Amino acid sequence: MRTTLIICEKPDAALHVAEALSENGEVKKLMKHGIPYFEVNNKSEKLIVCSAIGHLYEVDVKGDGKRSEYPVWDFSWKPKHLVERGQKRQEKCIKAITELAEEADFFINACDYDIEGSLIGYMILKYACKGAEAKARRMKFSTLTIKELREAYRNLMSTLDYPLIKAGMCRHEVDWLYGVNLSRALTESARKYSGKYSTLSIGRVQGPTLKFIVEREKEVQTFVPKPYWIIKSIVNLNGEKFEAEYKISKIEEKKIADEVAESCFKKEGEIINVQSKEYKLLPPTPFDLTQLQLEAYRYFKFTPKQTLDIAERLYLNALISYPRTSSQKLPSTIGYQEILNSLKENSEYKNMVDELYAIKELKPNEGKKTDPAHPAIYPTGVQPKEELSIREKKIYDLIVKRFMATFGASCLKKSEKATIKVSNHIFYLKGSRILKPGWMKLYAPYSSLEENLLPPIFIGQKVFFEEVKPELKYTQPPSRFNPTSLLKLMEEQGIGTKATRAEIIDILYKRGYVKDERIVATPLSFKIINLMLKYCPKVVSIEFTRELEEMMRKIEFGEEEREKVVLEAVNYLKPAIMELKLKENEIGEELSKVIKQVKALEFMIKTPCPSCGSQLLIIKSRKTGKRFIGCSGLWSNKCHFSLPLPQKGKLSLLDKTCSECGFQMIQVKISGRRPMISCPKCFINRLRNNKS
């Protein structure tokens, strides 16, 4: 009997593969070095299904070397537990797979079908399985359903997907060379000058992304608001009140605005023109990862990383297709009818499915974007075995309704516009109504079914202007990025990948380069970008990063050589790093000053002490280790004012005050959860009131 070792990316995926490929439905769960694996029989073959825990091998310095040394140009791939601390489970995983490989005659890489999955499987086959990559085959699938896994096993690729593997190796190697050299240069410069250690990082994708934020922050900070006036008017039409728009949206002189208001107030106007237009709104396109992240932020305020993590869990439970996709295509081979039949079993979706069945032909409104590996994100129709969490339900519902909406009929709307003349001034009355909701009904509550209905209107109809007044406004600076608008810009500019963009944004927060939901660049990020622009501008150049991305993309299609791309990256980086090395003391001085300022600001509350007016500080008790807000006047005038603070999560001070008491607001971020924004003073007051 032949023994085949199937390598999956995660334990949940391994279980699904084992269950799908078991001939009689029996799955043996076994353990080796504390690592679970599965054994099943398939015809005359024994299948051993094991899993990695993500990447088990990483790029590191060749041989031994201090972690502070730079520049470093020689690298090799090493087991993760030899590179990072606290990776005992990864070490056990490699041992278990190595021993299982000794029993095997045949090998299959069944990790996720993308660059990372191809690389994870290849490294395990090459190192843990001691050269088994040469005789291994590739299993390709987009869902963890029984049907698709069996189909993938019957149609194995004849060899591993080497173009993807080479592209993955190149991406990791280039990112490591940039990250380790630049980050060590910054960190060591600051440490040698100040004697204090602070983790500073910059990388190939991190650099231009941070530059986007810093440039936007400069625009916001240097923006000079200009006054303008709008005309606010309330008109009476057939006894009903409506808001009318003045034909000039911005009036730059107050005198003109006052004249308009004065000449139209309490005057009767007349409708001189009526326009109406029917138009169609096409159904939405299927979700690619970026669009899912944008919608999840819009409706639930989930960060891109939170959305990806939730979608990954739904995929591993076989509820949705592979989420790391850039495709907006839904091929008919996924089985539209079969999926809808399964979704109909859920009472929440039954009526929606029935509406779709009334349509003659099931044809999705596909977008332009494609992905050679996977289709757009769609529900598999598999029913959840366990109750989903609140967050999982939200993302699942969004994906299901988006999927169904793509098959819906176009929404038919009608817009109406009346032109009103009063005292030689022109105003507009606008309305809209939904004639046929079409797909919007299927996508509710994520689509707006609101209407702005007007009564019957006709030319010559009289309209009375009950209120007309000028209102002062100011021009606004460009909006700061939020996590999803930044993610969208990264995609538009071609930097990062669908799998890494959310993680890059997360790192910027962790490093203290940015803060707040509306992303604010900190002084440290300004300094980092200024130093990069001065000594190695290509590191933060969007064009250079995009060029590298394009070269790595070509490797995926066999149009470029991995070694050539790595060499090109090194050739640029070498002189830049040597320049940083020469200016180490100067750079260290600049960085140390900013780090000191930033750290001081992190602990200083802008609101003065309510008891004595002194500076309030965030203090950590040496005795208990707990953090709290305390008064600096404790030492000078014995002021004992204090407020408790949350003890878990990353705490940051926001540049806004409480609308109730004026105290500075705080934000607490706990990994995997939505940030909590609160007023420390109001919070404790409410707590005390509830107790009393």
Image (tube, rainbow, N blue to C red):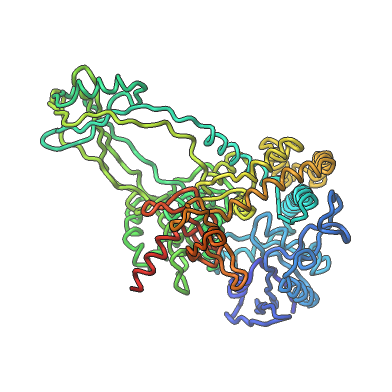
Q: Residue 600 at x, y = what percent?
A: 62, 52
- Horizontally, residue 52 falls left or right of residue 468, namely right
Q: Residue 319 at x, y = what percent?
A: 50, 65
Name the foreground residue: 132 vs 36.
36
Name the foreground residue: 197 vs 65.
197
Name the foreground residue: 97 vs 494.
494
The image quadrant of residue 56 is: bottom right
Give the farthest residue toward the right.
63
Q: Identify which residue is drawn at 72% across, 70% down.
A: 86
Q: Residue 608 at x, y = what percent?
A: 48, 52
User: In the picture shown, does residue 485 fall above or below 650?
Assistant: above
Q: Identify which residue is drawn at 75% across, 61% down.
A: 122
**In this orientation, does residue 114 appear?**
yes
Q: Quadrant of the C terminus?
A: bottom left
Name the foreground residue: 248 vs 509.
509
- Horizontally, residue 287 falls left or right of residue 32, namely left
- Horizontally, residue 322 falls left or right of residue 358, namely right
**In this orientation, does residue 502 appear?**
no
Q: Residue 394 at x, y = what percent?
A: 43, 61
Q: Quadrant of the N terminus?
A: bottom right
Give the farthest residue toward the front.
637
- Horizontally, residue 524 falls left or right of residue 679, namely right
Give the farthest residue toward the top.
424
User: In the picture shown, does residue 166 fall above or below 63?
Assistant: above
Q: How many marks?
A: 0
User: In the picture shown, does residue 341 fall above or below 656?
Assistant: below
